[in-house]
Image (spheres, grey):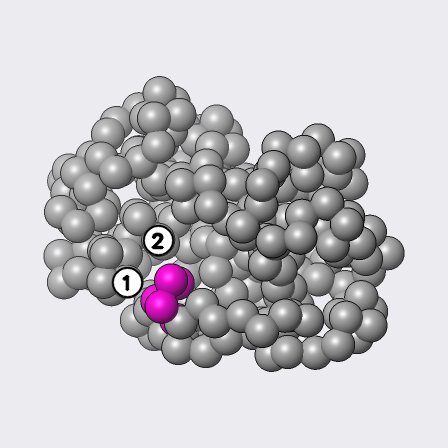
Amino acid sequence: MDALVLDLDGTLLNSDKKVSGRNLRALKEVIKRDIPMIIATARPPRSVKQMLPEEIRSSAFMVYYNGALIDGKSLNIHYHFSIDSKISTDIIKYLIETEPQHCLSIEAEDHWYSYQDLDFTKTMQITSNPEKITLKALKKINPTKILVSHLDSPLSLGNKLASQVTIITTDSNQLTQIMKHNISKEFAVSLLSEKLGLSLDQVVVFGDDFNDLGLFKCCGYPVAMKNAVPELKQLAAEVTDSNDQDGVAKTLEHLLG
């Protein structure tokens, strides 16, 4: 194992959105052995800060927003890949015209905005909601990521925009995540691996949802959680226990010896 890549929700984090003691001990052993660790998540920095212990964040390379924001302090790396405001304006216009029930919010480098009154505090296990701004102001932003839910036809949106942006549907098909074209977790991990001089063939990756599919295809040893979507399990070299059963730690303990 030349490097370790970890998803958060449904993988490293348990259902209480915490890192268990056993998982934390396993990650400390990875750090002790100087094995590069990459956290690759759909979440923004502020959210990860609440859930991931500082000792892990300070040691790992951080990939946020499914690859649209990359931080690697040890190599002085910072990349931000945003969607052009002209494209996001077209997306907003399309949703208003064809998906009247939609809920839309925009992330822009760790700031969260919407033109709607949205309350995600119960459904997303978070403590704050997007800042409400005018539709006119929203259209001027170059988003890091666009989040859309309550769509009647996510497939239609995907078909319309496939050539302009990267679209992933997660959370039991309830959430559509939109990033800059060709931006993904695997893009970010490939970029970091190149900077570190590592071969992806020797990279171990853990994941559970559709936004991990690309990583499972490019990394040498993909490990699916027991709770992972079937499509990931089909690509996995190993299926470990669930995120509530310390699946990450159990496999790492075996790999580390």
Please tell me which residue lies in front, 198 or 83: 83
Residue at horizontal 67 percent and vertical 48 percent from the top: 99
Query: In the image, which disc is placed on residue 17?
Result: 1
- For badge 2, the amino acid type reads Asp
Quadrant assignment for the N terminus: top left
Please tell me which residue lies in front, 43 or 217: 43
Residue at horizontal 14 percent and vertical 63 percent from the top: 21
Magenta region includes residue 202: no
Residue at horizontal 37 percent and vertical 48 percent from the top: 6
Above or below for 86 versus 197: below
Magenta region includes residue 124: yes
- For badge 1, the amino acid type reads Lys
Instruction: Locate residue 114, reporting x and y percent.
Output: 64, 70
Instruction: Locate residue 3, reporting x and y percent.
Output: 39, 44
Q: Which residue is most to the top?
A: 234
Quadrant assignment for the C terminus: top left
- What secondary structure is found at the residue carrying circle 1? loop
Structural distance between the alpha carbons of marks 2 and 1: 7 Å
9 sits to left or right of 14: right
Instruction: Locate residue 103, reporting x and y percent.
Output: 59, 59
Query: In the image, which disc is placed on residue 9?
Result: 2
